[in-house]
């Protein structure tokens, strides 16, 4: 149990960082995980190639919501070029837990939304890389 | 005879026939509460399939040598026993891969040859995707109209507008038992009204055949689909039961070997039913396995199985309903079989299922292939505990204890 729901995951789930929406975002994108019905939207403010602000909103399990919250902490103040280098390994390192193939999709939904929204990359991160 | 059988029945002994239930997961005894997804298999089924492969494996309906004749006999005997246990004749039972394949058979063969633009098919909001998507495909291809019988907040079909919905309909497709709510629908009554309106009736029996003792003939439907793996049988075998003259009048769905009487390069003549719809080498071992599963159910006594399971579902329903922060979906336990779906305040069903898994308790979480139903009920997803007669009261204790752990962990 404790290996699946580490303190920091529950913390991000209960106290999500950067949750909400942005007024007049430069980029907004949303997607869902058809297997479990999780939905996630991300809004971005981008100036001179740098992400000035980001918000996420949606509904889903603790893993998908915590992963989205953690991801937003990486994003603010970084260049769009840098973000391109984020991989599923970064997300899994943040979470620090072992996940089976079904829950892996929960964990990667936020990164999927980020990559689709910012770069138009479709598909699950890591699947075709 | 029946009384003697009933007095001999022991739920504990029945449970011992399922080898997997003796294993542990994460160091704890397995508590399997996902039988609505697939049931576990008794030793008799595993042995029948292994015995077939070890002693009788040969293709059927072809060889004139002994073991091919034996394999053909086993396959056709399985058809007879499965049909008989559901109150049907063997010539009316077409083997398919599963219930989904059977619905697709009807949609492609009957639907494509009988439905044209503007024709009406009536379904319900309670359907599994298997009885929605094949009709959506036909709608996109043919321009048929699909109407839906709504679901009440209590999880029953809302029949108040049924006659208007059925007006001019060619087919009504509905599930016998909801895979999310456990609701047992009044199929016979609805089928009679559909027939009066001139519509044929397709019943999805994927969740009823494993849990209820009934005869397909009594339902008054034209098509009945079932799947083997939810009724103690293996995966890869299911069936379509339909009236003989209806099957006779339908064109083949898939073409190939075994479904033909004669093939010339200029054309073919079809085999008689049910073989007309069984192109290619069928799942022989799986049909034999399902035959053994039906034998297993009959020898345990279908009423005994139903009674044992009902007691479990009642208890689970009652205890879950009393849990603070738990909302049970669907009707009272007197109107349901097999399962109890629920949502917990403040904890996503995926998290509920993941916490339970650490206690080796297996439940399903998500929308259970019934997304429109979840939308109608206003929930994104649910957790589902489902039962068979091999479950025991302590499985419910483990479920409830796991929910308490989830609440403590998430602080709700």
Image (spheres, rainbow, N blue to C red):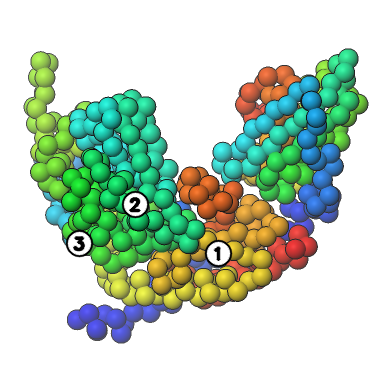
Query: Residue B378 appears at what percent x and percent y?
Result: 56, 51
Mark 2–mark 3 contact, CB under 8 Å?
A: no
Q: Which residue is drawn at 67% across and 60% down?
A: B345
Q: How far apart are marks 2 and 1 (CA)?
A: 27 Å
- Left or right side of B358 for B313: left
Q: Mark 1 points at which residue?
A: B328
Q: Is residue B74 visible?
A: no
State the CA–CA distance, disc 1 to disc 3: 31 Å
Q: Mark 3 points at which residue?
A: B218
From the viewer's perspective, tell me whether residue B200 is left or right of residue A69.
left
Residue found 86% across the figure and 29% down from its top? A53
Q: Where is residue B11 in the image (x, y as percent from the top left)?
A: 41, 76
Q: Considering only vertical position in the picture, is A21 above or below B223?
A: above
Q: Quick check: marks 1 and 3 in contact, CB under 8 Å?
A: no
| Residue at 62 percent of width and 65 percent of height | B326
Q: Can residue B169 be seen in this view?
A: yes
Quarter the N terminus of chain A occupies = bottom right
In primary-sequence order, the first of circles 2 and 1 is 2
Q: Is B170 in front, or is B87?
A: B170
């Amino acid at each position: 149990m404790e290996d699946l729901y580490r303190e920091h995951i529950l913390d991000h789930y209960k106290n999500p960082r950067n949750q909400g929406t942005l007024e007049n975002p430069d980029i907004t994108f949303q997607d869902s995980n058809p297997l479990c019905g999780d939905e996630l939207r991300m809004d971005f403010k981008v100036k001179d190639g740098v992400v000035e602000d980001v918000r996420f909103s949606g509904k889903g399990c603790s893993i998908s919501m915590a992963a989205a919250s953690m991801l937003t902490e990486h994003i603010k103040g970084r260049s769009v070029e840098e973000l391109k280098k984020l991989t599923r390994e970064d997300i899994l390192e943040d979470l620090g837990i072992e996940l089976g193939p079904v829950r892996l999709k929960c964990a990667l939904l936020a990164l999927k939304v980020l990559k689709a929204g910012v770069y138009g990359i479709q598909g699950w991160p890591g699947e075709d890389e | 005879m029946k009384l003697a059988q009933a007095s001999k029945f022991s739920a504990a002994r029945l449970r011992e026939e399922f080898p997997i239930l003796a294993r542990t997961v994460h160091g704890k005894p397995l508590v399997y509460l996902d039988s609505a997804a697939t049931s576990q298999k008794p030793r008799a089924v595993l042995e029948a399939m292994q015995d077939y492969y070890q002693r009788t494996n040969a293709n059927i309906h072809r060889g004139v040598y002994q073991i091919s004749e034996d394999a053909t006999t086993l396959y056709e005997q399985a058809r007879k026993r499965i049909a008989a246990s559901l109150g049907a004749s063997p010539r009316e039972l077409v083997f398919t891969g599963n219930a989904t394949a059977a619905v697709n058979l009807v949609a492609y063969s009957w639907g494509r040859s009988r439905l044209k633009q503007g024709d009406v098919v009536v379904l319900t909001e309670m359907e599994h995707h298997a009885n929605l998507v094949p009709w959506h495909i036909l709608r996109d291809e043919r321009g048929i109209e699909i109407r839906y019988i709504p679901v009440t907040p209590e999880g029953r079909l809302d029949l108040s507008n049924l006659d208007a919905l059925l007006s001019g309909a060619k087919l009504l497709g509905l599930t016998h038992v909801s895979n999310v709510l456990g609701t047992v629908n009044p199929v016979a009554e609805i089928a009679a009204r559909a027939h009066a309106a001139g519509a044929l009736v397709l019943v999805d029996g994927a969740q009823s055949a494993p849990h209820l003792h009934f005869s397909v003939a009594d339902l008054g439907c034209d098509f009945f689909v079932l799947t083997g793996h939810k009724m103690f049988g293996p995966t890869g075998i299911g069936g379509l039961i339909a009236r003989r003259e209806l099957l006779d009048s339908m064109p083949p769905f898939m073409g190939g070997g075994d479904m033909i009487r004669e093939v010339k390069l200029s054309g073919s003549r079809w085999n008689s039913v049910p073989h007309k719809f069984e192109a290619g080498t069928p799942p022989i071992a799986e049909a034999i396995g399902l035959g053994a599963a039906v034998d297993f159910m009959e020898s345990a006594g279908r009423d005994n199985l139903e009674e044992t399971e009902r007691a479990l579902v009642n208890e689970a329903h009652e205890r879950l309903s009393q849990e603070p922060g738990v909302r049970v979906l669907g009707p009272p336990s007197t109107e349901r079989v097999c399962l109890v779906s629920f949502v917990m305040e403040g904890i996503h069903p995926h998290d509920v299922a993941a916490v339970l898994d650490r206690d080796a308790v297996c439940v399903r979480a998500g929308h259970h292939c019934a997304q429109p139903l979840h939308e109608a009920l206003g929930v994104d997803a649910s957790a589902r505990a489902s039962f068979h007669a091999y479950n025991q009261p302590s499985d419910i204790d483990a479920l409830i204890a796991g929910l308490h752990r989830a609440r403590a962990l998430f602080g709700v």
